[in-house]
Image (tube, rainbow, N blue to C red):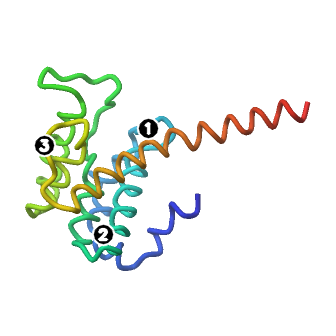
Amino acid sequence: MEKYRAWQHDEEYLALVGDLLAKPEVQRLADFTQHHFSNRLEHSIRVSYTSYLIAKKMHLDVRSTARAGLLHDLFYYDWRTTKFDLGTHAYVHPRIALHNAEHLTELNAKERDIIIKHMWGATLALPRYAESYIVSLVDDYAATAEVVHPWRMRMIEKVAGKAAN
């Protein structure tokens, strides 16, 4: 799990998102379970930092990628129980996150596209920027990893426990 804390020591990354991380509205994401074994803040940081590293390697817009990656799930409800008349959670929550992010900080066009289209694949609107694709794909990967890895570790422990008996 140490690799998931590398962001805390990355001064370049922290310079890009530190002001957002200091905001109570972002810290409040820690109060919401995201993918069974993580909270929304942990998930958002994982998506943001991983996307930032990829964008950096590809010489893309690291600032927009890191900041929008952090804000992509800026909503305050349990998506398993809250339902909307306007559409599915996959459709609605990026719009809520964008609305909340716009009240938190100034966003550029790329950051807006990253947030609103991060559910690409589950929604139809194609991302406009490479950075939007990166955040969308990293979000999918992170969500899967956040569910599968802890579940896999529990299964290994269970099997090891039975073998020891």
Q: Which residue is mark 2?
A: 55
Dividing the picture into quadrants, the one containing residue 148 is top right
Which residue is found at the position 39% from the left and 62% from the top?
50
Horizontal relation, residue 149 to residue 64: left or right: right
Disc 3 versus disc 2: distance between alpha carbons? 21 Å
Which residue is found at the position 57% from the left and 44% from the top?
149
Q: Which residue is mark 1?
A: 35
Of 36 and 148, nearer the camera is: 148
Of label 3 and label 2, which has the lower sequence position?
2
Q: Amino acid at mark 1?
A: His
Horizontal relation, residue 29 to residue 112: left or right: right
Q: Which residue is mark 3?
A: 125
Disc 3 versus disc 1: distance between alpha carbons? 24 Å
Q: Amino acid at mark 3?
A: Ala
Residue 127 position in % (x across, y down): 16, 52
Of 76 and 16, nearer the camera is: 16
Dividing the picture into quadrants, the one containing residue 161 is top right
